[in-house]
Image: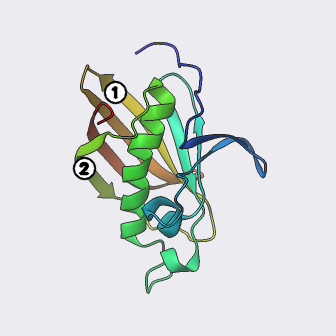
């Protein structure tokens, strides 16, 4: 794929988060929309060539009756990490992109007392598509694996 592009800050990707050195906040201005209203704080940072890490901090509302992170929250993190991670890894603003396909496999329970990270790798990029794979982890514990295809769409 090549060397990582310089981070370009836009309406989603904010400069360094003051409470989390090395991380940038991924936030939309209208916090009543899904990202902020459901997931809360979303952080992102580049990690090696063609890779990024996206982090959320689970809250009680994110848990199921077994006191684990609800699968719906894990799936939401995966979907958002496809966009945030590929934007950071490729330098393309995916604001108007769409999810074409997502595959996921749950392999462990998410602990709501620890940050939940999606480690994203851009596998291939074409003129119109971005192919991504990754894992949702908590430290060395894997919670899920995933792959996805995004369609790039120019501004309307």
* Residue at 55% in and 53% down: 29
Label 1 crowd bin: few (<14), some (14–19), many (20+), radius 10 Å: some
Total of numbered circles in the picture? 2
Q: Secondary structure at mark 1?
A: strand
Observer-nearest of 33 and 123? 33
Q: Secondary structure at mark 2?
A: strand
Observer-nearest of 77 and 156? 156
* Residue at 40% in and 40% down: 95
Residue extending furthest toward the left: 100
Q: Quadrant of the C terminus?
A: top left
Q: CA distance from mark 2 to mark 1?
A: 15 Å
Image coordinates for residue 88, horizontal then vertical, percent: 51, 32
Observer-nearest of 122 and 24? 24
Vertical arrangement, residue 72 with respect to residue 145, above or below? below
- Whether residue 110 is visible to the viewer of this picture, yes or no, is no
Left or right of 26 in this view: 142: left
Left or right of 128 in this view: 106: right
Which circle marks residue 59 in the picture? none
Q: Are marks 2 and 1 in contact (CB under 8 Å)?
A: no
* Residue topped by disc 2: 103
* Residue at 50% in and 67% down: 32
Query: Dividing the picture into quarters, in which one does residue 154 lie?
Result: top left
* Residue topped by disc 1: 123
Label 2 crowd bin: few (<14), some (14–19), many (20+), radius 10 Å: few
Left or right of 28 in this view: 107: left
Q: Quadrant of the N terminus?
A: top left
Image coordinates for residue 110, horizontal then vertical, percent: 49, 66
């Amino acid at each position: 794929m090549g060397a990582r592009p310089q981070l370009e800050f836009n309406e989603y990707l904010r400069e360094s988060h003051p409470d989390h050195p090395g991380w940038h906040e991924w936030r939309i201005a209208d916090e009543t929309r899904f990202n902020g209203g459901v997931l809360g704080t979303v952080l992102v940072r580049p990690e090696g060539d063609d890779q990024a890490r996206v982090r959320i901090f689970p809250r009680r509302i994110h848990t199921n009756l077994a006191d684990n992170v609800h699968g719906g929250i894990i799936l939401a993190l995966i979907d958002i990490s496809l966009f945030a991670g590929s934007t950071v890894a490729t330098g393309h603003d995916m604001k108007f992109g769409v999810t074409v396909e997502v595959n996921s496999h749950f392999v462990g329970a998410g602990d709501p007392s620890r940050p939940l990270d999606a480690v994203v790798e851009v596998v291939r990029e074409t003129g119109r598509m971005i192919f991504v794979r990754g894992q949702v982890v908590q430290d060395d514990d894997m919670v899920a694996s995933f792959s996805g295809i995004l369609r790039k769409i120019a501004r309307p």
